[in-house]
Image (tube, rainbow, N blue to C red):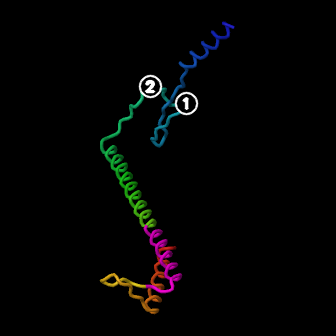
Amino acid sequence: MIRNIVIISLLYLSSAHCYAEIYKWVDEHGKVHYGDKPINNSKEIDVNISKQGHIKINNKREQKRQKLLETYADDQQREDKEKKKLKKKKKKHQRNCMHSKDMLKQYERASSLYNLDKTGMRVTISNEERLRKTNDLRKKINKYCK
């Protein structure tokens, strides 16, 4: 049992030190190539894989990247504002729709309609005025209840 543990441990530790050779060569057109197998005029190169974050980015490239990120954030904010605005408008339309439908039902059920004058007395409206108000409510329903 202990022998198996020792063998597995040794295999594990030895695999941590394994590495592959990397070769670099230039072809007849002057293009640089890299590979894991040697070619006739290739040279073996050492690559330090333990070092992280060693790629240097020039300042101009970093500024472009930052500007792109800021533009993306601005676009997201603008889209969010537009969505909120549309949502608010939709809610307002729903309220107007429900109100117009309720008023139309009241107008159609009532035997007569009236307005209040300055003294608070009821003044019955004419049939033409009632028809006009009913048509106005139907137009509002068509507009807001889509």
Q: How many marks?
A: 2
- Foreground of the two, 111 or 58: 111
Q: Is residue 142 left or right of residue 58?
A: right
Residue under label 2, please give it: 48
Residue 72 at what x, y percent from top left? 39, 52
Q: Amino acid at mark 2?
A: Asn
Residue 28 at what x, y percent from top left? 48, 40
Element type where label 1 sits in the image: loop
Seen in the picture, residue 61 relative to 80 is either above or below; the reply is: above
Q: Residue 105 lies in magenta, yes or no?
A: yes
Span colored in magenta: 92-113
Q: Residue 98 lies in magenta, yes or no?
A: yes
Residue most extreme to the top: 2
| Mark nearer the viewer, 2 or 1 | 2
- Foreground of the two, 66 or 136: 136
Query: Going 54% across and 25% down the picture, which residue do you hit?
Result: 20
Precedes in sequence: disc 2 or disc 1: 1
Query: Going 64% across and 11% down the picture, which residue do you hit?
Result: 5
Q: How busy is the neighbourhood of tag 1: few (under 14 within 10 Å), some, or many (20 plus)?
A: few
Task: Work out which quarter of the rendered image holds the N terminus and state it.
Answer: top right
Q: Is residue 39 left or right of residue 120?
A: right
Q: How busy is the neighbourhood of tag 2: few (under 14 within 10 Å), some, or many (20 plus)?
A: few
Query: Going 45% across and 24% down the picture, which residue do you hit?
Result: 50
Query: Going 40% across and 31% down the picture, which residue do you hit?
Result: 53
Residue under label 1, please give it: 36
Element type where label 2 sits in the image: loop
Q: Amino acid at mark 1?
A: Asp
Q: CA distance from mark 2 to mark 1?
A: 15 Å
Seen in the picture, residue 111 relative to 69 is either above or below; the reply is: below
